[in-house]
Amino acid sequence: MVNAAGEGRRLPRRPASNLAERWTRVDGVDVFFRESPAPVEGARVIAHIHGFGLSGRYLLPTAERLADEFQTYVPDLPGFGRSGRRPDMLDIPDLAHAAIRFLDDRGVGRATLVGNSMGCPVIIECAHRYPERVDRAVLVSPAGGAFNRPLRRAVAQLSRDAPREPARMARVAVPDYARFGVPSTMRLFRALTRYPSLQRLLELRIPTLVVLGSRDPLLPNSHRIGEIASRTDSHVLVVLLEGAAHAINFSHPDQLAHVIRLFMDDRPIENDPEWPGHVRLYEVHRGANHPRAESP
């Protein structure tokens, strides 16, 4: 909730996670975030970046599974969730700047960024504008671009996705969308779908993991994405998670945390034998310059 000055009110709430809930103030805006409950000595930093109209709450299932191994942050970017609003924070470059300023506030010089949906273009822009600040990128169900235009097409894609997500996702998403509002939705949608995500992705020179769900209606066919990624000797690793839709961070946290751990340690992508038979990971593409890429 936001007061007349555009600041987030610190309303008492029951914690939604075992991560510690915190507030800070960045560039005059109250920012709500969650972090590892205790400092992780000598650990690498991971920051989780949420999607369109949402708060960081739906990212918590995956973040919680990594918080004991990595120093973990899950912020609500300005204008989203419980954080305060700023009228100039509804463009991808502005949101990327806000994410970097949040890391500044936390004293983090360099981090791995894990995003879902709109969070992926934000991460790509962070790596484009601030390459010294991003160690690795994990792009889960990237959204935006021509495949999601016009708005009615995106709405239809979201409508097909909704029944494919766990029912409890609605309890998180609906209040977030209602709080975000229609005017903000229209403005940010235009910015998101005009952002050159593909061009910037292919220009990245950091290890990058792209995780796709086989049932995600917001994305092109995974083979098409692999074909696009293969245009360059990039550091992009593309992995398909069978049975998952768009909100993989929420619906399949064990599998996503598993593949992130492997990626962080440059280990081969392998399935966990304890998973149900219908849940499997498949490597779609591994760039020639990606760590552990095999020579032909």
Image (cartoon, helix red, strand yellow):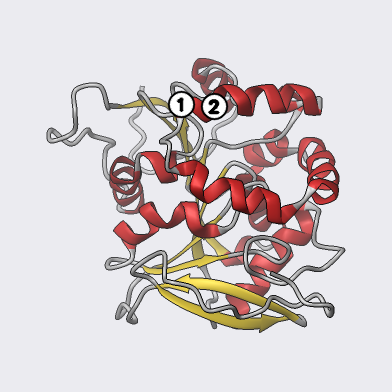
Secondary structure of the residue carrying numbered label 1: helix
- Establish if 156 lies above or below 181: above
Q: Which quadrant of the view contains residue 239?
A: top left
- Residue situated in front as seen by the camera: 141 or 291: 141
x and y percent of residue 253 in the render?
A: 34, 46
Q: Residue 146 placed where, x, y %?
A: 76, 25
Residue annotated with mark 1? 164
Q: Quadrant of the C terminus?
A: top left
Q: Amino acid at mark 2?
A: Asp
- Can you give x and y, in whole percent of width and height, for residue 91 in the image? 81, 53
Q: Judge whether residue 142 can be spotted in this image.
A: yes
* Residue closer to the observer: 211 or 289: 211
The relative height of residue 277 versus residue 257 in the rendered view (above or below) is above
> Tag 1: Cα neighbours inside 10 Å, few (<14), some, or many (≥20)?
some
Which residue lies at the image location 78% right of the left edge and 35% below the top edge? 193
Quarter of the picture holding the N terminus: bottom right
